[in-house]
Image (cartoon, rainbow, N blue to C red):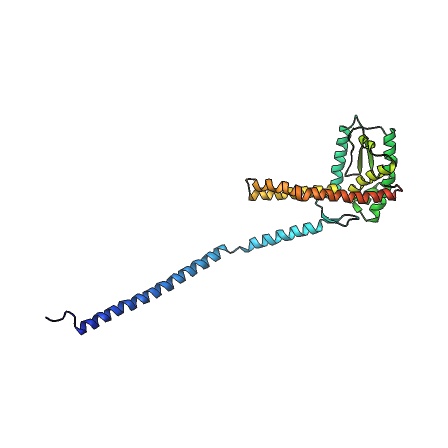
Amino acid sequence: MEPMFTMTSCRYLQYHRFVPSTLEGTNRRFLFTNNNNTRNSKRQRRLSTTKIPPYVWATLVGTTSVLTYGYISGLEEVPVSKRKRWMAVSSEVETRLGNQEYHKLLRHFSKDILPPTHRASRTVQRVGSRVGDAAIQFAARHDLHYFSSKMNTNKNITAFTYTVVRSDMANAFVLPGNHVFIMTGLFRYVHNEDELAAIIGHEMAHVLARHAGEKMSESMAKNLLVNLILLLDPSGVFASIFLPATTLLRDLPHSRQMETEADRIGIQLAAEACFDP
């Protein structure tokens, strides 16, 4: 019986087994190269599609430049403390709003305002006029143009107005435009003119330092940030966290800082008016 496979047939089979394997390897290398090229082209197309257009960069750079210029140009210095703060409200707008509020309060307290001939009114007027003169000199010495220019426009204008209101509340406050209000309940704790001069000087210091305008500017900036946050998060969750956080971490400490500045300037005004605060 003859063998089924001869040497020749074995060589033939070996040859034909070798050829397909070689071709298969070549095909694999070709497919691998093709896949790499495809992935590279897809990556390049993806990078080209995600590239930020030049006009977007121009808008970002322009907006940042405008905001930076607006912030730097709006910086002002508080007298005595030399603290820098950003002011978005002009002194003219601040004074106009203060005058409007002053007339509203006059109507509101019309039945409780003491007449100028009242003893308390005369005392406040006498002490306030001396401290007011010291405030004018203070503004000229520290080049507070927003205060001294208003005094120079009309030589007959009174530096400050003083309104004494009959009330059990122990309080005093001032409005932009140099309007000082004193509640009669405060006289339970004020025992002499020196102490009254310190209180009036404290209120005048708020005007000299433009603390009301600073609070307006901060309110405007906070409202702008809240609107931007609501655009990014319409649900309002982040805004509900942002507002209490800014009140606790920024508004309350900053309000205390402004009161400290008013104390320092107010004591200086009372002392320059020859009182012993």
> On the picture, is 83 further left or further right than 63?
right
* Residue 261 in sight from this viewpoint: yes
Figure quadrant of residue 61:
bottom right
**Outermost residue to the front:** 1
> On the picture, is 120 further left or further right than 28?
right
Question: Which residue is depicted at the point 84% across and 43% down?
Answer: 269
Quadrant location of the C terminus in the rendered image: top right
> On the picture, is 240 further left or further right than 132?
left
Question: Which residue is depicted at the point 87% across and 38% down?
Answer: 194
Question: Which residue is depicted at the point 48% across and 57% down?
Answer: 47
Q: Is residue 69 above or below residue 89?
A: below
The foreground one among 188 and 100 is 188
In the rendering, at what x and y percent does residue 211 appear?
A: 75, 42
- Count of labels in the image: 0
In the rendering, at what x and y percent does residue 155 appear?
A: 86, 41
* Residue 149 in sight from this viewpoint: no
**Outermost residue to the top:** 111
In the rendering, at what x and y percent does residue 209 appear?
A: 77, 44
Q: Is residue 7 above or below residue 197?
A: below
**Outermost residue to the right:** 274
**Outermost residue to the left:** 1
In the rendering, at what x and y percent does residue 251 appear?
A: 69, 42
Quadrant location of the N terminus in the rendered image: bottom left
